[in-house]
Image: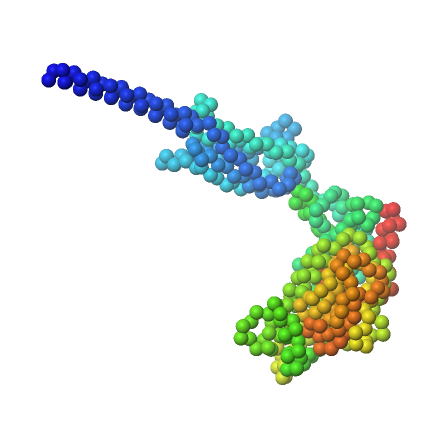
Amino acid sequence: MRNLLKVNRKTIRAWGISFGVLLLAVTGLWLVLVYFEGEEPILQLSLTSPYIGSSRAISLHVSDQKSGIRSVWVALTKDGKEFVVLDRRFERTSGIRAHDASLDIRIDPVKLGVSDGPALLRMVARDYSGRRWWHGNITYLEKEVFIDTRPPGISVLSRPHYVNQGGAGLVIYRLTEKCPQSGVKVGDRFFPGHNGYFDDHKIFMSFFALGVDQGPGTRMVLSATDPADNLSETDFHYSIRRKTFKKDVINITDGFLQRKVPEISTGSITLPGASILDQFVWANRNLRREDYRKVTEIAGRSKAVMHWKGAFLRLPKSARKAGFGESRQYRYKGRVVDRQIHRGIDLASVPRSQVPAANYGQVVYAGLLGIYGKTVVIDHGFGLLSTYSHLSRIDVKVNQMVSKGDIIGRTGSTGLAGGDHLHFGVFVHSTFVNPLEWWDAAWLKNNIMAKIEAVQARWH
């Protein structure tokens, strides 16, 4: 019995020693892997541009999946001085630590007293690791930035600016610095300016337009935004001439509906169980809107090259059947079913007449275009397009360069056309304008070319 007790004591002592060793090992392993873990916090900065204007918001994401985030510090360093933007400590709440944090930080150089010029954006994140004498692991991140709190200067070089309601205009201006966006605001619409025409690349041209619904009282202003998002707006002298547009009634017949709706409905109209009249109204509204969106998208890719020369051509030996800006009522059996604005001029000659390109340019669209049927769009440069719709045949291809008078197709009645004719349109960036102006050599000289020539003579 006494020998057995001695054996048991030895066994217990051995187990105790083994347990102690194991406990020390586990504790040491925990200290090394957890408490004294060596993984640094992760800093991710969202800064799309190095420019910081009078006020700039930046997004900073911090993560530390092991010991948790202890603190984040952000400062601007300029001319040997340090300007603290953020100094935040993440306290442990009931033993719970923050492992992810998204911080929206606003930098206001003027309030901080930071002058314009190159600077350094410095960021430091620490975690709760026991390393570095319980100061934690540290991550540093630095980005070179440029402080620019001054808005760009805009000088108007062209004058005067007389614009018709539903018409086009041109403003030529000079910027004091490179700006990613500048142009003319017309009410709630924006018409971008482009450089490259003049030797001085700080000189821009903005072709702009007034919609048929924008008469006297519409505010127009030149604006420019620099890389630091500083905005300048400058008034320029202009005068808007009010125009009165005709009203017209389009009577819709059953025969027209039977002919036209099936033609344009393939893959476009999805109204199960709808009457053919409802399908027409849907197309007249929604496809028209989609067609406008497509042309606007095309205009957004217009090149800053002036292809056109002189007045635009009109369909030869043609009669005008519908004017620009007409307010149309669509009636079916005496009942008004829709209202739309006519955005071009309808010209009729003999059936399947040859259609000439109105001016020099590049074909940027050639195919079916919703309610307009077979359509050709020509880019004349600087956001100026001409459109040729309801064609029976297209004789040009996309990217083809055409000269004034080149035959691009033949008139027809495709789309929502009641008879053979050409729907001719002129489009400036995002707005259809009155083609009458572009057919008029005197208007073109006084409102466009004279301004360009005057600036060329002064700034050559």
Which residue is painted at 78% across and 63% down in the image? Answer: 396
In the rendered image, the vertical position of residue 395 relative to residue 32, given as above or below: below
Q: Is residue 446 left or right of residue 387?
A: right
Residue 183 percent coordinates (x, y): 73, 52
Q: Quadrant of residue 308?
A: bottom right
Asked whether the viewer can see residue 341, the reply is: no
The residue closer to the viewer here, 168 or 392, is 392
Q: How many marks?
A: 0
**Colour basis:** rainbow
Q: Quadrant of residue 320?
A: bottom right
Residue 26 percent coordinates (x, y): 34, 25
Residue 360 percent coordinates (x, y): 83, 59
In the rendered image, the vertical position of residue 285 relative to residue 52, given as above or below: below
The residue closer to the viewer here, 427 or 71, is 427
In the rendered image, the vertical position of residue 54 relative to residue 364, given as above or below: above
The residue closer to the viewer here, 100 or 208, is 100
Asked whether the viewer can see residue 224, the reply is: yes
Q: Quadrant of residue 427?
A: bottom right
Which residue is painted at 68% across and 58% down in the image? Answer: 297
Q: Residue furthest bottom?
A: 333
The residue closer to the viewer here, 158 or 252, is 252
Residue 60 percent coordinates (x, y): 54, 39
Q: Is residue 56 left or right of residue 299?
A: left
Which residue is painted at 60% across and 77% down in the image? Answer: 277
Quadrant where the N terminus is found in the figure: top left
Which residue is painted at 75% across and 59% down in the image? Answer: 398
In the rendered image, the vertical position of residue 330 relative to residue 87, given as above or below: below
Q: Residue furthest right?
A: 457
